[in-house]
């Protein structure tokens, strides 16, 4: 059941270290490097590319976008597995990697945009390759953080008894990863992959067509097609673009995500067979296919056995030698940390010098914007929790219902809200509120899905026998939620909240500053300040507003969400 495994009071005392002091400095230094790179841009790029709104171009645009999404997801998956595993296995590295993950996920995707794009254009002057790489990298930064958090949370929540069993059976590092650690994170990883790809679709318009320092950068793709259609008010093109997008999402869901979700069901820890499980006709076909059986027996199984034997033999040889820890390794770590500290300190000093030149009016604009956007983020989080928790638990505990609602939820999470925003703004203009309300709606649409998909994964991961026990003991609905459902989904819920808050701040950049049919609509906030500074090339203002946003995200994580994250690891861990 879900109960404490160690004393929570001793675990959650506030512990401040040198890392907590260096964390804000590292944020300031990293953002300064990003903005400084953008400010020194000298490359050239042919920005005269015009998106053709003829429907005959849609298949070509969609294919190019699909290739970018696939490349970004592949990078995200590899990064998430390696990063989370290293942080989990090494106590020393976890003290560096987890705070660094806080830094990276706190910097908004669209604040990465100036430096990444302009630096790569400068690296490949006059070529489209730089813009292509920048677009893939920006989609990657929007995909990978929630996958990394999810896999790290799953690794940290592995029951102690299973870890001890792997030690008793003397599994090698590879065997332990392949048979215990990776399976423990499959359910959450699959659902967060769905969310990551959906998030990539959501910001597609911003990553394929954007304006930086009065320069236009456009790549042929479905996102740039939708943006061009929205800018020109071509509702027919918008409609067909969304139809193509929904069709692609539905095909991917049927042939990839549904089989993966059904396949991941076998990795749940259960002692009683579930009465309802996710189903997939594609997976059933592959399991019955003689061709796939032959490929598995002659290709995949020999490869797996080779890996297992190879890593096992290396582990046995290394265990016989029992090497002593090298003092040079410790010295190298200290040298690396010293170099990193020197870079952080130097970047911080230069950032302070640049910010000291900012007028007081700009600082006032940043402070007021931070206040209003903070309120919007809090409202968005409350709305998201009220909507997604009951829906996510319902979907997660009913595979038949999930078969129906999962594609709908995925489509809703994937359709770029900015493509539909012109219609939404026209409606809000008639009833009042304008962009102040519209920004909250768009931020909610850009962040609530992180919570929803994590709650679905958490509800699916709760063993069926616990629900059977709740039924036998005739627990009321309130007691069932209090003693089983909420504790069961809590680790996943915290992961969803952390990434959703970052998503809300990120969505504020797109939701508080809208160019609509030649008109500029803004709402007071930090997101609109960042977008405005990026558009006009005001790099000190961009630096200041991005630093403030990132520090707000990291401070909230450190004081609120991280203690809850540790609570989820030690108090609401499933015991076997």
Image (cartoon, helix red, strand yellow):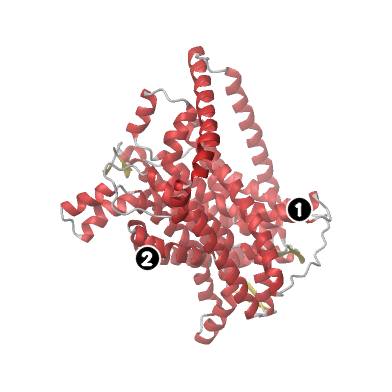
Residue 291: % across, % down: 52, 44
Residue 474: % across, % down: 16, 56
- The residue at which mark 1 appears reads as 130
Give the farthest residue toward the left: 473
Q: Secondary structure at mark 1?
A: helix
Residue at the (49%, 55%) spot, across then down: 257
Residue 387 figure quarter: bottom left
Residue 426: % across, % down: 57, 83
- Left or right of residue 479: residue 451: right
Which quadrant: the N terminus? Answer: top left
Q: Secondary structure at mark 2?
A: helix
Residue 160 in view of the camera: yes
Q: Say the numbered circle drawn on residue 306.
A: none
Residue 403 figure quarter: bottom left
- The residue at which mark 2 appears reads as 386
- Left or right of residue 55: residue 13: left
As rendered, which of 352 and 66 lies closer to the eye? Answer: 66
As rendered, which of 544 and 280 lies closer to the eye? Answer: 280
Compared to residue 453, the image places residue 296 above or below, namely above
As rendered, which of 308 and 438 lies closer to the eye? Answer: 308
Disc 1 crowd, CA 10 A, few/some/many (<14, 14-19, 20+)? many
Give the farthest residue toward the front: 290
Q: Which circle's residue, 2 or 1, is located before the other in the chain?
A: 1
Residue 369 in view of the camera: no
For the residues marked 2 and 1, what is the alpha-carbon distance in whole angstroms?
A: 42 Å
Residue at the (54%, 39%) spot, across then down: 295
Residue at the (47%, 33%) spot, across then down: 177
Residue 549 figure quarter: bottom right
- Left or right of residue 227: residue 409: left
Give the farthest residue toward the bottom: 430
Which quadrant: the C terminus? Answer: top left
């Amino acid at each position: 059941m879900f109960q404490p495994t160690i004393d929570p009071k001793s675990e959650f005392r506030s512990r401040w270290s040198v890392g907590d002091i260096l964390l804000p400095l590292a944020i300031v230094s990293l953002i300064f490097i990003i903005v400084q790179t953008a400010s020194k841009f000298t490359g050239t790029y042919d920005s005269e590319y015009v998106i053709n709104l003829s429907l005959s171009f849609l298949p070509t645009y969609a294919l190019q976008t699909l290739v970018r999404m696939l490349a970004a997801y592949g990078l995200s998956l590899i990064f998430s597995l390696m990063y989370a595993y290293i942080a989990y296995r090494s106590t020393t590295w976890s003290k560096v990697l987890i705070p660094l993950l806080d830094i990276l996920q706190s910097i908004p995707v669209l604040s990465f945009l100036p430096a990444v794009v302009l630096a790569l254009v400068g690296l490949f002057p006059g070529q489209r390759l730089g813009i292509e790489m920048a677009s893939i990298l920006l989609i990657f930064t929007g995909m990978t953080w929630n996958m990394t958090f999810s896999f790290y949370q799953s690794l940290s929540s592995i029951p102690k008894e299973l870890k001890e069993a792997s030690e008793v059976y003397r599994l090698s590092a590879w065997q332990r990863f392949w048979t215990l650690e990776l399976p423990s994170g499959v359910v959450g990883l699959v659902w967060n992959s769905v969310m990551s790809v959906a998030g990539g679709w959501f910001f597609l318009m911003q990553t394929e067509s954007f304006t930086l320092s009065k320069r236009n950068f456009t790549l042929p793709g479905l996102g740039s097609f939708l943006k061009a259609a929205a800018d020109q008010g071509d509702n027919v093109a918008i409609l067909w673009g969304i139809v193509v997008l929904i069709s692609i999402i539905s095909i991917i869901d049927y042939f990839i995500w549904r089989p993966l979700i059904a396949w991941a069901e076998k990795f749940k820890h259960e002692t009683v067979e579930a009465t309802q499980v996710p189903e997939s006709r594609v997976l059933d076909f592959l399991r019955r296919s003689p061709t796939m059986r032959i490929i598995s027996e002659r290709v995949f199984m020999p490869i797996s056995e080779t890996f297992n034997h190879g890593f096992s033999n290396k582990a046995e040889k290394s265990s016989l030698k029992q090497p002593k820890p090298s003092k040079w390794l410790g010295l190298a770590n200290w040298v690396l940390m010293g170099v990193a500290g020197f870079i952080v300190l130097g970047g911080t000093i230069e950032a302070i010098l640049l910010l000291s030149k900012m007028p007081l009016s700009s600082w006032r604009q940043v402070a007021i914007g931070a206040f209003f956007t903070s309120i919007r983020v809090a409202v968005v989080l409350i709305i998201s929790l009220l909507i997604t928790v009951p829906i996510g638990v319902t979907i997660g505990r009913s595979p038949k219902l999930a078969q129906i609602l999962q594609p709908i939820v995925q489509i809703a999470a994937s359709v770029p809200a900015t493509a539909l925003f012109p219609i939404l703004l026209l409606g809000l203009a008639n009833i009042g509120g304008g962009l102040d309300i519209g920004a909250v709606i768009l931020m909610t649409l850009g962040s609530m899905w992180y919570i929803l998909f994590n709650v679905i994964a958490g509800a699916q991961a709760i063993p069926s026998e616990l629900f059977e026990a709740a039924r036998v003991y005739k627990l009321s609905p309130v007691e069932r939620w209090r003693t089983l459902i909420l504790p069961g989904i809590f680790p996943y819920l915290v992961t969803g909240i952390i990434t959703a808050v970052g998503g809300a701040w990120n969505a504020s950049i797109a939701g508080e500053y809208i160019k609509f049919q030649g008109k500029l609509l803004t709402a007071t906030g930090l997101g609109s300040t960042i977008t405005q500074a990026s558009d006009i090339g005001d790099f000190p203002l961009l630096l200041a507003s991005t630093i403030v946003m990132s520090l707000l995200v990291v401070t909230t994580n450190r004081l609120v969400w991280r203690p809850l994250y540790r609570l989820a690891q030690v108090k609401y861990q499933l015991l076997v």
